[in-house]
Amino acid sequence: MKKTYCLFAAFFLFTSIFAETITFKADSLTGTAGSKTDTTKMQGNAFVKTSNMEISADSIELSGDNYRYIVADGTVVGKNIESKMEFTCGRMRYDRQTKVAYLEDSVHLVDTANEVTADAQIINYNQNSEIAIMQIGITLKQKDNTCTAAYAVYRKNDKMLEMSGNPKIVQGQDTFRAQEITLNLDSQEITLDGRVSGTVTDSKKEPPKPAAPPAPAPAPDQNEDKHE
């Protein structure tokens, strides 16, 4: 059975087999109900909230048995309430059962808890393991570090970043390159493996210069008046 709704900011609630309530709203909504083909398509200011995820986009589709899958398109903005991970991207696919989010098209990810920001073309984020796999054009920033690579694994709970694919870390005025680089975001320790290179700037201050010695006293005048 297919139903079409044209309600501004329509508001709906339902409970799935995952014991989770989903809240959603949009400018317009189209729904198809079936035991294995439940589908809801929202257009215009679409918004979905699950127990641990908030997603807004130009359009959002819920599909699968008990609305297992969420697909968001166009100006996607999301937030993981539990892990305090926020993101923006052009398209997102989310599996409510495995809790894996696939983000693509100019992804910007922010880990507010660890003060980490990451940009990439593709990020696969697993909520259960708190691991984000990043691909293509990666730039990750944290504290004084700017990290770039073609492939990276960010382990949020361990505060570890593993990079490959021409990886580089710029740490202040220092630069490090290798085939593989691991950065401990807590201790700031860097591990380099394979074709290691880099530059390190000696930032030690010069010792203070000694004070100039006092000028010598003037010699007595030899032409002073003599006693008779």
Image (spheres, rainbow, N blue to C red):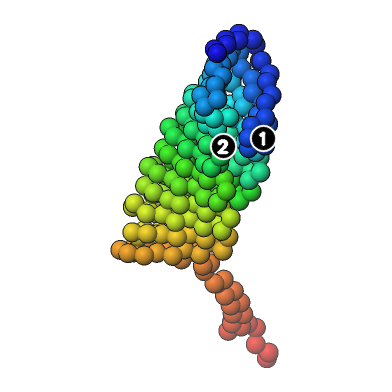
Looking at the image, residue 151 sits to the left or right of residue 74; the answer is left
Is the residue 207 above or below the residue 174 in the image?
Answer: below
Instruction: Name the residue at 58% across, 29% down.
Output: 66
Quarter of the image for residue 42 reads top right
Q: Which residue is tagged 1?
A: 20
Q: Are marks 2 and 1 in contact (CB under 8 Å)?
A: yes
Locate residue 187, reporting x and y percent: 56, 63
Would residue 158 be found to the left or right of residue 197 on screen? right
Earlier residue among tags 2 and 1: 1
Label 2 environment density (alpha carbons within 10 Å; few <14, some 14–19, many ≥20) = some
Q: What quarter of the picture does the C terminus occupy?
A: bottom right
The residue type indicated by label 2 comes to: Arg
Q: Position of residue 35 (x, y in %)?
A: 55, 25
Q: Position of residue 218 (x, y in %)?
A: 60, 79
Q: What kind of element bears circle 2?
A: loop
The residue lying toward the viewer, choosing from 181 and 213, is: 181
